[in-house]
Amino acid sequence: MPRREQRRSSVFARRALVVGGVQLAAFGLLAERLWQMQVVDAGRYRTMANKNRISARLLAPERGRILDRFGLPLADNRQVWRASLIAGEARDVHATLDAFERIVGLTPAERRRIMRDLFQHRRFVPVTLRSFLTWEEMARIEVHAPELPGVAVDIGHSRVYPYGRLLAHTVGYVARPNQKDVRRDPQLALPGMRIGRTGMEAYGEARLRGTAGVEQLEVDALGRVVRRLDRQAGVAGKDLQLTLDAALHADLRAAMGEQTGAAVVLDATNGEVLAMVSTPSFDPSLFNQGVSQAQWNDWVTNERAPLQDRSTEGLYPPGSTFKPTVALAALKAGTITDKTTVFCPGYIDIGNKRFHCWLSGGHGKQDLHQAIQNSCDVFFYTVAMRTGIDRIATMAHALGLAAPLGFEVPGTQTGFIPTLEWARARHRLWTIGDTAVHGIGQGFTLLTPLALATMVARIASGRALLPRLVRDEVVRDAPMLDLDPKWLQAVRGGMWAVVNDPHGTGAAVKLDIPGVAMAGKTGTAQVVDVSQAQYRAGYDTAKWPWKLRPHGLFIAYAPYDAPRYATAVVIEHGNEGAASAAPVAKAVMERVLRRDPAQRGTPPGPTAMGTTAMGTTGAGKMGTAEAAAGEAAPAGVAAR
Amino acid sequence: MSLFEKRLLRAEARGLGSKLWRVSWIYVLLLCLLSAVGYVALYSAAGGSIRPYAGGHVLRFGFALLLMLGVAMVDIRFIARLAWLGYAAGVVLLAAVLRFGHVGNGARRWLAIGSFQWQPSEMMKIVLVLALAAWFRRASWERMGNPLFLIPPALAVLLPVALILKEPNLGTAVITATIGGTVFLGAGLRWWKVALLAGLLAIAAPIVYHHLHAYQKSRIEIFLHPERDPLGAGYNIIQSKIALGSGGVWGKGYLHGTQGRLDFLPEKQTDFIFTLLAEQFGLVGSYAVLGLLMLITFWGLYIGLRCQHQFGRLVALGLSTNFFCYVFVNLAMVMGLIPVGGVPLPLVSHGGSAMLMVMIGCGILMSVHVHRDAEFDDAAETG
């Protein structure tokens, strides 16, 4: 069919000519562009190429700040002057480094680090020679610029932590990015760029980091800047606002004194973390420049582990602070009512083993209210055995214990509560005695101070609150807990009596504010078994080596009738919780409750650790902050 | 020409000698000239030395030229029969590259065979042209009006384009789609469908973009605007433009370019080779090279116009468009007109695998020319 064939070939010919025409136009465009560049603009380009050079300098973005709930900076940036070297612009890198060593000085270790950086980065990426230049060093570099081809002085930012070691765990720290980080985001190769390694610096990395900008400079043959051609500023990192109240946090830290441990204060209405302390602490600014081996060894061999964030990573047996949970589990299971009584002779025999109450003479007849008030062990051995470990674990999870809380701080531990299934999986014989022991918060159960604070907040509010550190996320009302208000009220009443009944185990920490009551629960968690012999002989744990003493715990919320704040305090090896942990809770509760209620939502006025102390060095500032915290501590603590 | 004479010519074309006689030697000469330009540029890229680029370039071109002539001797009907097999192999290799490929320049697009590394997407463009030409070779104008007939070849374009996008290599994906679209056009795709497609693309692009995740958007941003990656491409483009523009009308003279300053161009011997030429030989030199590249491109179209069978026409159209895309994308990139990187200047840039693929393409083009009036069972069918 030649007609069809002919039609097809003529269509093709026309189409091919159209395609050719488009291609011709494209070639014309290229030719026009070449004309424009090589004839019209040739002079300009020649000027750039022959007389001057374009030097593109990259601008590290400013890292976003971390702020407390009132906008006080917890992690801030300070301008520093910095010398860097662009290998591509140096005629001879070694000669330039020799000159730099002569003019400013370089240690062999610095030089090794610089050579490594130069080797790892592309030739036009500036490599930091020295950060934190003094005025004198800067002047010397400027004067000797002709001898230092490729060396430039620029302004950079250095991370500073106004609160220093006071907030080191929660805020975290930044460090130099390693090769793996740089492969993921090449802009981390820029001098001065830091990456968050722990705490909220790590959590908020994506928003804090920002995007690099670029600056094009016209530089003469001696490497001096003639003028700036173009500057794209890059995008600074976004600030991250936390729910923390820095002033309250400082008070809490001051109340902890020299004791090792952790304490958390939550807003009992919505789960916001207001303060979160772990002691001892470390200086987070040391990581910024790189930690020395000696310092690192000191930290990791220290038996009090300053790098650990005890509030989220520390796992402790809850001791008697677990009893409200056991009580709620029993009430829900129906194995007791708020009227049920148990007789406590000071011990209970289970199988062939005798389990003691902490009060060797016994409490006598105890109902739930009294048992919580007096922290009667025999009552809770009995109740736990009636209820069973699985139902206790289920209630614990519902109260936020050993349950995923979705907390922001990286590395937050969930904790652990055993179940029968867990014991079966491990071929461990689970006896009724084991259940009894877990009824007083001993045994395998391990919980974080954060989880304990969450538990108190949930008991106080009756809602499944989740602890949160980031402020600007949408707050949704937590769902109600699946618990009869009657049961909650029974447990709350017991916790009220702990502090406010003259015979309660925490009577010593009754608030000194008229009309405001705190509810709480003491806890003393053994870390070693007390033998029968020791028990009979009577023992004083305060005389034991530090590592063997029991942990002191205290959980509390206030005000009793309208819960606003919830707290959990754990003092490692602090002996009795009533004596070590409870005063900390009292101090911080009185502090937060005494504030003018009208000011609770606004900054509590300028304090010493506010903006005033920010011009000085990190170390100086830290001193100021800690001293201020010391001053701010309520008198009540010292008296105790 | 009488039917008898045509028969006679065809009979002659069966012998090797007569086939060689029918090779378009002017085209071969143009390719040799272009490769010589490459030699000159690479000699200067090494600072006036045969090593390490220029010497290898000549050897590789010699080998590739023989291969091209070998391919030109293969009967075009045989090539047509192998088209879909080649297409399948291309898709398998593209999938393999996603699984086993090497990451270079941030994308997984290289496949290593022994010490020889190449990009299957280069081969894909050629086999796609062959496969589409094989599909359309019997399609009449009326048949081309049937949308159902157009669906399978459209899918055949989209599959490799999607795989290349996944590497990710937006530039090559767009080029591949362009080449495929040109073959459709040559086969007789209705203009209103072309317009419809262009309109749909114009509407869909922003919508699709809008629904991407933030990180995907930023990835596309970097695709489209590598100058926003302040550590890499932007610096290169600026330096390339300065070198190019400063060449002026007559250039700085051979081996008098500012190579020292181009030391920071990590790919001056590959992607930015044209910059070196333009700097040293000025507008005169760059226009001469541009003219040579135009001649080679249009010679391909001319081969298509002279061909007596539809398969050959479409193959010539597609392959010359392939060559054109290399040239245009590379030149526009070094002039800072478009941001896409990673496309070499054919037969000039350093690198063996790209040259080999270009020359195989030219060989197939030449086979079309040698067998331009071969008896094909590709008479237009009824729609």
Image: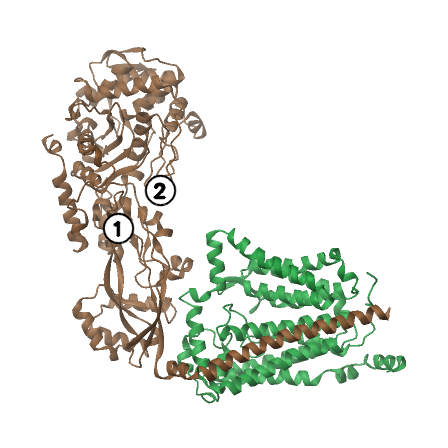
The number of discs equals: 2
Chain A takes which shade in the image? brown
Chain letter for mark 2, please. A
| Residue A143 left/right relative to A190 | left
Q: Any mark on residue B142, and which?
A: none
Chain B takes which shade in the image? green
Q: Any mark on residue A75, and which?
A: 1
Chain letter for mark 1, please. A
* Label 1 Cα crowd, 10 Å radius (few <14 / some 14-19 / many 20+): many
Q: Is B70 rendered above or below residue A618?
A: below
| Residue B215 left/right relative to A91 | right
- Residue B194, percent from left and from top: 67, 63
Quadrant in which residue A265 is drawn:
top left
Looking at marks 1 and 2 on the same chain, the residue that comes earlier in the sequence is marked by 1
| Image quadrant in which the N terminus of chain A is located | bottom right
In terms of depth relative to the viewer, which is nearer, B382 or B346?
B382
Element under disc 2: loop
In terms of depth relative to the viewer, which is nearer, B63 or A6?
A6
* Disc 1 from disc 2: Cα separation: 17 Å
In terms of depth relative to the viewer, which is nearer, A522 or B246?
B246
- Residue A469, percent from left and from top: 32, 41
| Residue A494 left/right relative to B98 | left
- Residue B19, percent from left and from top: 77, 81
Same-subunit check for callouts 1 and 2: yes
Q: Is A241 rendered above or below residue B178?
A: above
Q: Any mark on residue A408, and which?
A: 2
Element under disc 1: strand
